[in-house]
Amino acid sequence: MQAVLYQIVRGMVKKINRRFTLKARPKALPDADHFALEAVDHPDLASGEVRVRALFHALSPWQGQRLKDFANYTKPFEIGELIDGDVLGEVVEAAPGADLAPGQLVTARLGWQDYAVAKADMLTTVTDEFDPTLWLTALSSPGLTAYTALDLLGRSMPGQTMVVTSAAGSVGGYAVQLGKLAGMNVVGVAGGSEKCRYVVEVLGADACIDHQADGYVDALSAALPSGAHQVFDTTGGPTADAVFGNIAKYARVLIVGRTSSNNSDRPDLDPVNMRLLWAREATIQGFSRYSYPERWAFAQERMKELCRENKIHANHNTVNGFENLPQALHDMLAGKFIGKVLVKCEAPL
Ligand SMILES: NC(=O)c1ccc[n+]([C@@H]2O[C@H](COP(=O)([O-])OP(=O)(O)OC[C@H]3O[C@@H](n4cnc5c(N)ncnc54)[C@H](OP(=O)(O)O)[C@@H]3O)[C@@H](O)[C@H]2O)c1
């Protein structure tokens, strides 16, 4: 791997930037064969730009979704396009007019590459009040998505029951905790007994049902004697459909993601239990955090307060090595991890 990092050009050693692009589209889950590892020159900096060395890449299901040629709220990657993604990195070079000094930690959507060039004013600066990884978890998309969806579109009433799918997941894990902080009875849904134990014992849910276990549908019904008053769904597919089969009258259903549907070879299929959503007069609300940029700072401040008060548990897994990004994305989409997945890289300085 080191061989692609440097090139000898007319006797001089020239630094090369590694980047992953899309080579072929997966039918269902992606694997390493769907990506090309390229080595390209470092571009020069223009006025106001900085060079950022990636330290951590955050993985998200939308990256898997954009590999497919399937229209959704984001457009698919083109073949040969850099795989986009959120990065925590350090500024290593700043051009005149860039108001950031080398050494400053920043986050931004800079993609799967060792080094990125960006306008300094497009970057979020990371303060040292929190562990730097929190800026990719609780204080970033996962935490802000759960907070904003529940704050703006949920009606989290004490004593009512909220079901959260992918409850051990990155976004779902914060929804569970925010639901409990709001006084709700929270029932999580997660894949496997280890995840379910985590959702109850660490995140504080009242119960968690294993969607991979035999009898999932019956166990879910048994855990919801009064039905689900609120649903926070990030998976879609049969897992969510079983929840829709148990909604209470006037339930609020927040559709936040579709990992299960998007992972499948039929991402176009929709819930079977739609008739119950009608019969029980549910409110179904699709949510995208990208529609509420004016709320991100507010949500981030509230999440900071909760972190300061130790009321929020932020969890992530670290996978080592830039070259392991494709496999880590596969494993994340397949449900191998609890919480956010961060890939730590060691690009040479
Ligand atoms: N609307 C927005 O603004 C917004 C923002 C961020 C993310 N999202 C969306 O929210 C969803 C979750 O994102 P995330 O980052 O928090 O990912 P995540 O939930 O941490 O990771 C994916 C999880 O999906 C679950 N999964 C995979 N296949 C499944 C299946 N067949 N049935 C049920 N669950 C399955 C797995 O959990 P189990 O092992 O527990 O099954 C896996 O761990 C994604 O669809 C993402 O695109 C939306």
Image: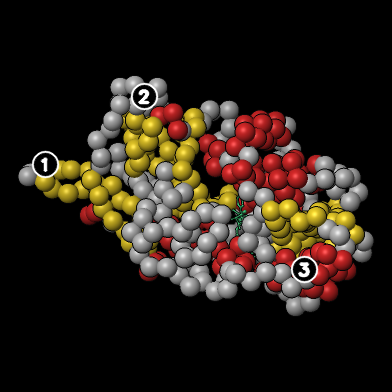
Considering only order in the chain, which callout, 2 or 1, is on the residue closer to the N terminus? 1
Side (left or right) of 108 relative to 134: left
Which label sits on residue 69?
none
The residue that mark 1 highlights is 12
Looking at the rendered image, the disc whose residue lies closer to the viewer, 3 or 1, is 3
Using a 10 Å C-alpha cutoff, classify the residue at mark 3 as few (fewer than 14 neighbours), some (14 to 19) or many (20 or more). few
Q: Secondary structure at mark 2?
A: loop
On the rendered structure, is 44 left or right of 152? left
Between 68 and 221, the one lying in front of the other is 68
Instruction: First in sequence, mark 2 or 3: give its number.
Output: 2
Residue receiving disc 3 = 274
Give the CA distance from mark 2 to mark 3.
52 Å
Residue shown at 35% from the left, 41% from the top: 116
User: Regarding mark 1 in the picture, which secondary structure is present there?
Assistant: strand
- Residue 98 circle label: 2
Measured from the top left, where is residue 305 in percent x and y?
70, 30
